[in-house]
Amino acid sequence: MIPFKAFLSMSVPYKLFRGYRVPAGANEDWIEAAADRHLQPGDLVISSYPKNGTTWLQHIVFLVLRKGTAPQGMMEVIKAMPFLEQDGPSQNTCPMALKYHLPFRLTPLSEDVLYLYIARNPKDTCVSYYHFLKKLPGYHIEDFSKFFEAFLSGEVPYGDHLQHVLEWHEVSTLRPNVLFLTYEDLSKDTEGALRRIARFLRRELHDDTFSGKNFFIDCVHRYNSEG
């Protein structure tokens, strides 16, 4: 049975994978391999709906796990935290984390794996996603009102935003190995959010991390502009 069905005539084209909307240009083998991946004990998954702060969270996790050592550009983050469903198999046999946009029900699950999920309010998600998709080849999205209607009905790549968020929020209340974060909390209470992330990852942040002009905090705020 072919798991994909394309809907290219829509105002926002997508494919169906196991009944779920994914980007129209998605590589079918890569999506399937990401969904069926056998995770190892100790793996870390960073997940979100697109344009919800995933890249920012990746940089924060990099800083926490490397004890404040900043990445040498975005490529180092990509190599350390491969996005398998988009970029395909990684040569990194021991990744720092794995990035996912697939919904909870299609993300490989294990009690021995840690999951970080970040959500963002739907208004900002919709606007940011619109501008992001406009730049991609093959979409030709111009009319925001049409995109807005498609977004509200879940007729966009990665489907219904609210359903994506609520599924992960519910599981976070049931599984101690899932930490649910919001972009807004991370922006408003950066220190508190960083402490939660570090504690979840079983890492220690010293008090001087948050005192005075600190390189770590400067990096955290700077990477916010990268998504």
Image (cartoon, rainbow, N blue to C red):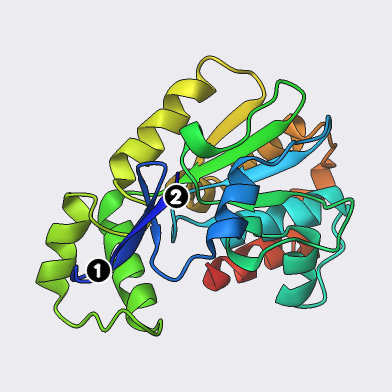
User: Which of the pair 134/85 is nearer the observer?
Assistant: 85
Q: Residue at x 66, y 57 (%)?
A: 84
Q: Tell me the CA gap for discs 1 and 2.
A: 22 Å
**Is residue 111 something that shows in the picture?**
yes
Residue 218: name its quadrant: bottom right
Q: Residue at x 89, y 54 (%)?
A: 93
On the image, the x and y values in percent for residue 2 come to: 44, 50
Instruction: Answer few, some or many: residues within 10 Å of disc 1's Cα (few below 14, many 20 plus, some between 14 and 19).
Output: many
On the image, the x and y values in percent for residue 39 come to: 75, 36
Q: Which mark is residue 101?
A: none
Quadrant of the frame with the N terminus: top left
Q: Relative to residue 225, is residue 152 depicted above or below?
A: above
Numbered disc 2: secondary structure:
loop
Numbered disc 1: secondary structure:
loop
Question: Looking at the picture, which amino acid does disc 1 mark?
Answer: Val
Which marked residue is nearer to the observer: mark 1 or mark 2? Answer: 2
Left or right, 20 with respect to 204, comes to: left
Q: Residue at x 51, y 51 (%)?
A: 101
On the image, the x and y values in percent for residue 89 come to: 74, 61
Residue identified by numbered label 2: 2
Labels 1 and 2: the sequence-earlier one = 2
Q: Relative to residue 161, is residue 115 depicted above or below?
A: above
User: Which of the pair 93/8 is nearer the observer?
Assistant: 8
Instruction: Answer few, some or many: residues within 10 Å of disc 2's Cα (few below 14, many 20 plus, some between 14 and 19).
Output: few
Q: List the single residue furthest toward the front.
A: 1
**Is residue 211 something that shows in the picture?**
no
Question: Looking at the picture, which amino acid does disc 2 mark?
Answer: Ile
Number of labels in the image equals 2
Residue 142: name its quadrant: bottom left
Q: Relative to residue 111, is residue 197 depicted above or below?
A: below
Q: Residue at x 64, y 40 (%)?
A: 36
Residue identified by numbered label 1: 12
